[in-house]
Amino acid sequence: MSPFTYARVANVSEALDLGSGASAKYLGGGTNLVDLMRETIERPAALIDVTGLSDTIEERDDGSLLIGAGVCNSAVAEHLAVRSRYPLLARAILAGASAQIRNMATVGGNLLQRTRCSYFYDLDGARCNKRTPGAGCDALEGFNRNHAILGASTDCVATHPSDMCVALAALGAVVHLQSAKGKRQVPFTDFHRLPGDRPATETVLETGELITAVELPSLPHATRSAYRKVRDRASYAFALVSVAAAIDIEDGNVKDVRLALGGVAHKPWRAWKAEAALKGRPAQAAAFRGAAQIELSEAKPLRDNGFKIELATRLIVAVLTELTQEMA
Amino acid sequence: MEFVINGTITKAEVDLRTSLLDLLRDHLGLTGSKKGCNQGACGACTVLVDGKRILSCLALAAQYEGRQITTIEGLATAKGKLHPLQQAFIDHDGFQCGYCTPGQICSAVAMADEIRRGVPSHVTADLLANKVALSHDELRERMSGNLCRCGAYNGIVKAIDEAYAELVN
């Protein structure tokens, strides 16, 4: 691990003062960053511990929920308003990592966790454009069973590992940011980037900008929502494919549907095309399958991950069917 | 830096890069917590901070200054009476080589508290249930962050299952 300075800050302005340096990093629970520092993939010169900041969950009058960036993952999943009003979010968090890691990991840190692509981690043995821009990508022709089928580029086929973020994408959350220039809000689905020819830049965060909160807008039909994750073992593993979904049905037709996929792309993948194809249509398996196929029509399988296309399709159908039957 | 470990205030001057696990083992001589993978994949380093289970290998010691840290060494009473989970692991052969055991036991101590608080898990059917029964599936899911390479899971599950009734009620 490279040497660094450490400061625990008491407020946002102190954090922003210290965090403006190019080699400074904000530290949450450290579950990903400390590991990457030990591997010397990350080498920050300064760590600014922001775990003491914004660690509350606020229920607001307009029905929205404002989750501080410093709240740990388990506290979000345990919160009664999350469990009752946004069950897909509680389910997504509980499907991720282990109890120990969920107790450490923060909401802000979860958004910023980096890919688990093994070539990204293999500093000595593999080329990676994410680590070293322009070096090349060994995953492209390598063992890429876990890699992306949607929105990838010839420079990077890595996936985003978060479960929580898939639910946040489906819910249309809003990320609250603050920097020396002021505050701004970014729709969750715009927060993470697709790789393009700059896979090292994973979000729209600017240097020194701090995530202060994630806002969940009021979404009454999210009370009927689900998160389903398929992985190589039953627990404590990253997703091969996951689906977060909420559906609102009126007179047998889809009034509104929210759908996002995990494990398939460089970012939590909001299935906008499938959603558009479903609105106003009968809430039935045939329509679900048709919509899923539209979403996945542009999927580009690599050598080892073609199975994800059918898996994602079946998962979408299964989750929407289950939610529809619950409502019947 | 000042740490509160097993109820005792302890001072240690360590490099900022030191993990909580290395602080415990290499600087304070508390070698009960084990270093398995050192990357958050096995749970052998599990300790309690303010009563909650965390992985000490992924924790920078500096972040835990002033917090209440409990390790396997702090579970028995001052007079040496074992914690019910420690006794249950002995009674049910909840180990073979024993390397994952301190992590398993610390993890199970915190799990009992989570059950008491009605915290749901990935396999809990009703997210809003006030009470969670520790079924076989619940136990295995909630303990999935602690791996045992010897595969002593049958004994581990039996030990936790037996001690659980006493701990939760």
Image (cartoon, grey):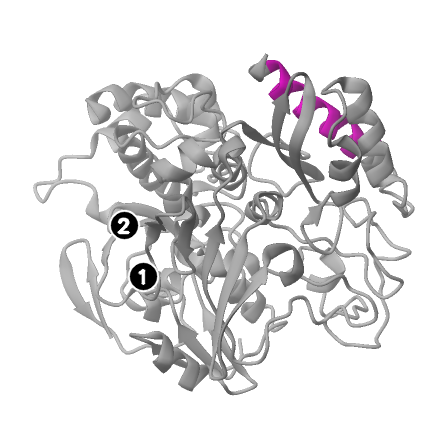
Figure check: B63 above or below B160: below
Marked residue chain, label 1: B
Q: Where's residue A20, x and y in %?
A: 49, 85
Front position in the image: B21 or A33: A33
Label 1, residues with CA under 10 Å away: few <14, some 14-19, many ≥20: many
The three-letter amino acid code for the residue at tag 1 is Leu
Front position in the image: A281 or A15: A281
Examine the structure image and report whether residue A116 is included in the region drawn in magenta. no
Q: Which residue is mark 2?
A: B71
Figure check: B92 above or below A208: above
Badge number at residue B66: none
Q: Where's residue A224, x and y in %?
A: 53, 27
Examine the structure image and report whether residue A316 is included in the region drawn in magenta. yes
Residue drawn at (83%, 71%) of the image: A197
Q: Under tag 1, what secondary structure?
A: helix
Specify whether A100 is left or right of B24.
right
Image marks 1 and 2: residues in contact by CB distance under 8 Å = yes
Instruction: Find the distance from the CA under tag 1 to the CA under tag 2.
Output: 9 Å
Quadrant for the C terminus of chain A in the image: top right
Q: Residues in magenta?
A: A310-325
Q: Predominant secondary structure in magenta?
A: helix
Marked residue chain, label 2: B
Q: Under tag 2, what secondary structure?
A: loop
Q: Is residue A4 among what the camera can see?
A: no
Residue drawn at (40%, 67%) of the image: B60
Q: Which residue is mark 1?
A: B24
Q: Is residue B80 among what the camera can see?
A: yes
The three-letter amino acid code for the residue at tag 2 is Thr
Specify whether A118 is left or right of B156.
right
Residue drawn at (21%, 65%) of the image: B66
Front position in the image: A39 or A15: A15
